[in-house]
């Protein structure tokens, strides 16, 4: 199944987006029920969302580490 998940599951308080993948909690919860077209539509907007999720300097860099492990970077 197509998924942007990199196993860094934590929602940003200000945006409501997952710090790992950029999806909302509702999108994550319903992901299995979406069609492939719905998943692709959401995945197309995730890069823009991720620009709103700047990591704090010296903060948790789990997203980058997980992305590298999964070959996403």
Image: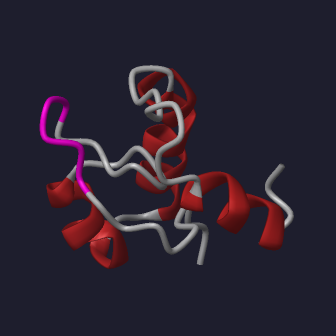
Q: Residue at x 71, y 62 (%)?
A: 65
Query: Picture coordinates of residue 13 (x, y %)?
Result: 13, 41
Q: In the drawing, does residue 25 fall left or right of residue 7?
A: left
Q: In the drawing, does residue 66 fall left or right of residue 45?
A: right
**Residue stretch in magenta:** 11-15
Q: Residue at x 57, y 61 (%)?
A: 62
Which of the two residues, 40 or 52, is positioned nearer the viewer here? 52
Query: Picture coordinates of residue 32 (x, y %)?
Result: 35, 78
Q: Residue at x 48, y 54 (%)?
A: 60
Q: Quadrant of residue 16?
A: top left
Query: Measured along the vertical axis of the image, is residue 44 above or below residue 19?
Result: above
Magenta part mainly helix, strand or loop? loop
Which of the two residues, 48 or 12, is positioned nearer the viewer here? 12
Query: Measured along the vertical axis of the image, is residue 9 above or below residue 52?
Result: below
Q: How is the image coloured?
A: secondary structure
Quadrant occupied by the N terminus: bottom right
Query: Picture coordinates of residue 38 (x, y %)?
Result: 41, 51
Numbered-mark total: 0
Which of the two residues, 4 or 39, is positioned nearer the viewer here? 4
Query: Picture coordinates of residue 64 (x, y %)?
Result: 68, 52
Residue 70 within the segment the image draws in magenta? no
In this view, the residue farthest toward the front is 58
Q: Residue at x 28, y 65 (%)?
A: 28
Query: Measured along the vertical axis of the image, is residue 10 above or below residue 40?
Result: below
């Amino acid at each position: 199944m197509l998924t942007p998940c990199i196993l860094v599951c934590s929602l940003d308080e200000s945006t409501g987006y997952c710090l790992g993948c950029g999806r909302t909690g509702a999108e994550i919860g319903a992901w299995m029920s979406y069609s492939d077209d719905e998943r692709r539509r959401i995945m197309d907007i995730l890069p823009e969302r991720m620009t709103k999720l700047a990591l704090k300097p010296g903060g948790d860099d789990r997203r980058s580490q997980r992305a590298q492990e999964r070959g996403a970077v």
